[in-house]
Image: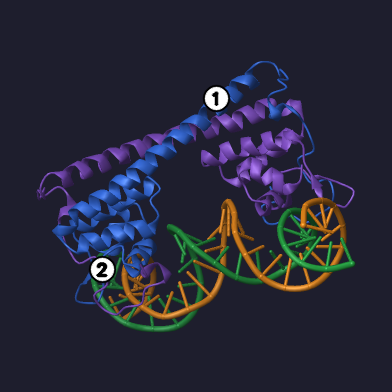
Chain colours: A blue, B purple, C orange, D green
Amino acid sequence: MKIGDLAKRTGITAHTIRYYERIGLLPHAHRDGSGRRDYGEDSVVWIGFLSRLKTTGMPIRDMLRYAKLRAQGDSTGPARAALLSEHRDRVRAHLAEIHSALTVLDTKIAGYGETERMDPNDADNTKDNITNPTGARQNRLGRD
Amino acid sequence: MKIGDLAKRTGITAHTIRYYERIGLLPHAHRDGSGRRDYGEDSVVWIGFLSRLKTTGMPIRDMLRYAKLRAQGDSTGPARAALLSEHRDRVRAHLAEIHSALTVLDTKIAGYGETERMDPNDADNTKDNITNPTGARQNRLGRD
DNA sequence: TCTTGACTTAGAGTGCGCTCAAAGCCCTAG
DNA sequence: CTAGGGCTTTGAGCGCACTCTAAGTCAAGA
């Protein structure tokens, strides 16, 4: 399988695949007769797993630690399990935070439904000057 | 309240508060006699809300859109509600993805518990060469 | 045969969200 | 009165994860 095919099958770009190889997240790919990268099914599965880790917010440096343990063989199983389960715990904690914030959002959205009630405990129903009335500089985020 | 006090109460740094003001996320603060920023309770509440949006992964450019609608007054209520509820939907979708990825993680962690079973469908139980056996360059992520 | 397009490399650039540096002013405790 | 620390500004720097450019090689279809 060529790098472009692998890209299509995994949903990441060929650029990113090369980048992952460069930093050590992917093994050095085997090359075909003309020096091009040639992949097997295992690459699809491994990238799929990396993508899942990424979905859960794992930083690349941690994926790298995982990949290196993996490369050291079966004896690192417990270490890998520990790495993953610590990560899982962090993700669950983060998930709880998001849920809690979402509840606040739900309340606020529901509040907008009721014809512009001005709850004094709802800071967002105050209308102080949030934009930039002076001509003061704003960075690239300012245009919008 | 001085910027340092506000920083302590909101959990973001004074640097970040000034940055938020610069890009328009916070209103221009009132100054005391000696030209220093002076804040009220409303700033604590507003930053708290921004932090919740941040927790849910809203990019600053969207917070900015929200802040600008807010500054335009009560008539933008429906637009603000729309913005928030679209965001809420995205967050919920992302949450579902994370949950699904977590399930995979759970399975893998459980798999490590069973004395190194080699499931052929589990790519991570293969041990191909994942690190950099040649002396090829790696960027800053490589050291670890 | 020609052309198109995918591939190769090293290295530079991007977007996000801060984070810090430098140089100087001002308030307060000792 | 003095020292320390917090405040002010402008502008640069950083960490992350890509993302793209330039210049070139190569393979396969019309």
| Chain bearing mark 2 | B
Query: Badge 2 is on which residue?
Result: B131
Mark 1 residue type: Asp
In the rendered image, residue A105, in percent from the top left (x then y), is placed at: 56, 28
Q: Is residue B20 left or right of residue A49?
A: right
Q: Residue furthest top?
A: A114
Mark 2 residue type: Thr
Q: Secondary structure at mark 2?
A: loop
Q: Is residue B128 left or right of residue A120?
A: left
Q: Residue drawn at (37%, 50%), measured in percent from left and top?
A: A54
Q: Is residue A45 visible?
A: no
Q: Badges 1 and 2: C-beta atoms under 8 Å apart?
A: no
Query: Badge 1 is on which residue?
Result: A106
In the rendered image, residue A65, in percent from the top left (x then y), is placed at: 31, 60
- Image vertical order of residue A30 relative to residue A134, above or below: below
Q: Residue drawn at (28%, 57%), measured in percent from left and top?
A: A66
> In the depicted view, which residue is nearer to us: B102 or A38?
B102
Q: Quadrant of residue B28?
A: top right
In the rendered image, residue A138, in percent from the top left (x then y), is placed at: 74, 55
- Image vertical order of residue B127 relative to residue A53, above or below: below
- Image vertical order of residue A86 relative to residue A102, above or below: below
Q: Is residue B69 left or right of residue C2?
A: right
In the picture, the disc for residue A21 is none
> In the depicted view, which residue is nearer to us: A38 or B7?
B7
- In what quadrant of the picture does the C terminus of chain B appear? bottom left
Q: Residue drawn at (26%, 68%), measured in percent from left and top?
A: B131
Q: Is residue A86 visible?
A: yes
Q: Residues within 10 Å of mark 2 (few under 14, many from 20)?
A: many
The reply to whether label 1 and label 2 mark residues of one chain is no
| Chain bearing mark 1 | A
